[in-house]
Amino acid sequence: MNLSLRKADFLLFFIFAAAALISAVSFPRPAAGKEMVRIISYGEEYGTYPLEEDAEIEIEREGHHNVVIIQNGIVHMDYSNCKNQICVHTGEISDKGETIVCLPNYVIVEIIGTGEGGEEDESVDAIVK
């Protein structure tokens, strides 16, 4: 079996390579939305906050009290009056899809991404580290 390359083969290769390069440059990539911190309390959205802005959020409902801190693009549960303190010991989260859950106080803190128009971006199903 003779597998010699001819001038036409090289020309065809360069045509395909040039077409791929042109298409990669000419189609702009979609602008990434910004990441937000969504807090859910008792199954309802309590609030949504930009991950890039520092904030201290106090959640008080039906005798339950939680404090969420957003600082330098990192989120953590600073305080909870629940007995087991798992949410406080969860530590810091900073990537889209990560969550902190306080089951006894019915609080969920999650990082979500938003699209260009501000709507939630659900293009990622899971993040594995």
Image (spheres, rainbow, N blue to C red):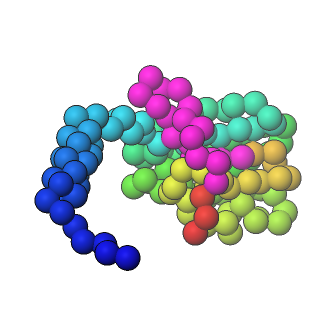
In the picture, measured across the screen, residue 96 lies left or right of residue 25, that is: right
Task: Report the number of discs.
Answer: 0
Question: Hey, which residue is sitting farthest top in the picture?
Answer: 117
**Is residue 21 visible from the viewing direction of this image?**
no
Left or right relative to 110: residue 27: left
The furthest residue to the bottom: 1
Which of the two residues, 89 or 94, is positioned nearer the viewer here?
A: 94
**Looking at this view, is 106 or 121 the one in front?**
121
Does residue 84 sit above or below 45 in this rendering?
below
Q: Position of residue 29 (x, y in %)?
A: 33, 38
Question: Residue drawn at (31%, 72%), measured in percent from left and top?
Answer: 3
Q: In the current view of this chain or complex, which residue is farthest to the front?
A: 1
Q: Does residue 117 belong to the magenta stretch?
A: yes
Q: Position of residue 112 (x, y in %)?
A: 56, 42
Q: Is residue 75 magenta?
A: no
In depth, the one of 97 and 92 nearer the eye is 97
User: Which quadrant: the N terminus?
Assistant: bottom left
Q: Residue at x 60, y 58 (%)?
A: 127
Q: Is residue 104 visible?
A: yes
Pinpoint residue 47: horizontal percent, then vertical percent: 61, 32
Residue 103 point in image, percent of width and height: 83, 53
Quarter of the rendering containing residue 76: bottom right
- Extent of the magenta region: 108-126
Which corner quadrant of the image does residue 101 belong to?
Answer: bottom right
| 41 versus 70 height, above or below | above
Question: In this view of the protein, which residue sits in the foreground, 12 or 40?
Answer: 12
Identified at 58% across, 46% down, the residue is 124
Q: Quadrant of the C terminus?
A: bottom right
